[in-house]
Amino acid sequence: MRSITNTMSRRGILVGTGGLLIGATLPSFALGIMEKSAVTFIRKVVVDVHIVINSNKPEEKMLADFESIFADYSASSLIAKTALGAAGRKISQNQLAAYIEAFQRYFSRKYGRQFRKFAGSEINIVGNRDLGSKGVLVKSTVEFSSRPSYSLGWWVIEVNGQPKLFDLVIEGISMISSERTEIGALLESLGGDIDRLTARLEAT
Amino acid sequence: MFRAIHQIGILLLLLPLLSACGTDTAPADRIFDPFEKTNRQIHALNKAIDGIALAPASTAYGAVVPEEIHDAIDNSANNLALPGQVINHTLQGELENAILTALRFTLNSTLGFAGLFDPASDFGLFALPTDFGETLAVYGFAEGPYLELPLLGGSTVRGTVGIVVDFVLDPLGVYIPTPTREYLFLLKGVDIIGDRLTYSDLVDVLLYESSDSYASQRIAYLQNLRYNVEIEPEIEDLEDPFAFDY
């Protein structure tokens, strides 16, 4: 039912505008994230992602680059806490901090590997949806020359006045939902022990 | 065509199964899985079959069968699914997709040597897969409880009814004589092994790297399903990003 629209290659335009945007200052987010600003933010993220996936670096270097993109652009501690859910309320500040750190590394490496598979693709922003106080969903398609494209949504929220990435939605599948399922199952299999969960994430 | 219309009768018999499922729209994370216990048993069975038979068979297949032949088998099997998809696109009122799919079938069946090659994709005419489960969704039937089917994996009650109807309505199943039809079944079987190879990364992550492969597959299946039937979650149904900002 979903139709695939073939768009012309827009890498030139994308990289061109992206290059300009990196130097430009972002508009104020004091009034909540305007849709336009969220799109501008994601354009910037996409430019950086393109640079990494087309850099032909070895996997470990690429994963390190994705780790820093993740640290710069995402609401990483909020993502870690959302994946853990209510279990995080019952633990000490130190345990929480250790978990968040382990999760961030586990998470950025896991999804960095996914992004590597986008090598040679074009990520084109095709629209956005205002989610009110919950932020903005920026919609994009990942296009390949020899394969059907697929959809990639970027959920942007405002944290301390700055736009941050909260979730990625690939063909409708939410990364946060997947990770909540994963972390919940892992914690249960470890008898609800947060320290063992942290150790397990560090080892992954 | 008359036969196809006649077979709609079977569909009408199946519909009451669905009407009991309710029609509420749902948040993205909503899971309705009253048969979880049985589903988990079937999941364990599927995982065992994958580990014992499908995964090793696909590895051997990849080692023995050249990529060109693997592609040709995959193209063939996918091509044969297209007439059924034309019917479903039409029933859904998606005429543009129906025409594109018919065009894809025509190109690949002629220029593509009876579907062995996929010249349509070279023209940017990629597959637009759909099924009768999606057609039912368009007509407003709720997805019903989640089901894991033996060998087939994740589905819903609506999706399972769709699989049965697709099988019955498939124009190729109706018009192709018996010996050829059996050959086509074999082709589909081989293609499943090939697909296991093509999607090995994804399958391995879901089945063997998840802490609870049943739950991981279920949420991924349901979210992708809802995306494909274009149910955009209501804003109030989306989770609050700040709910766990402790």
Image (spheres, rainbow, N blue to C red):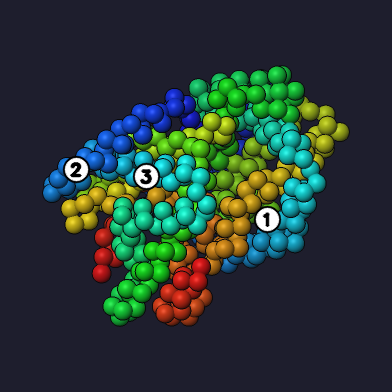
User: Relative to residue A136, is residue B119 depicted above or below?
Assistant: above
Would you name the residue on which mark 2 appears? Answer: A25
In depth, the one of A136 and B62 nearer the eye is B62
Would you name the residue on which mark 3 appears? Answer: A48
Visible in this render: residue A58?
A: yes
Label 1 sits on what residue type? Pro
- Please count the marks in the image: 3
Q: CA distance from mark 2 to mark 1?
A: 55 Å
Quick check: A134 left or right of A87? Answer: left
Q: Secondary structure at mark 2?
A: loop
Spot occupied by residue A92 in the image (x, y as percentages of width and height): 30, 80
Q: CA distance from mark 3 to mark 2?
A: 16 Å
| Residue positioned 57% across, 45% down in the render | B159
Q: CA distance from mark 3 to mark 1?
A: 43 Å
Visible in this render: residue B172?
A: no
**Do pointers 2 and 1 mark residues of a single chain?**
no
| Residue positioned 35% across, 28% down in the render | A13
Label 2 sits on what residue type? Thr
Are the two marked residues, 3 and 2, in contact with CB atoms closer than 8 angstroms? Answer: no
Q: Which mark is residue B171?
A: none
**Do pointers 3 and 2 mark residues of a single chain?**
yes
Instruction: Determine crowd level at label 1: few under 14, some 14-19, many 20+ residues with C-alpha closer than 10 A.
Output: some
Q: Which mark is residue B150?
A: 1
In depth, the one of A128 and A164 nearer the eye is A164
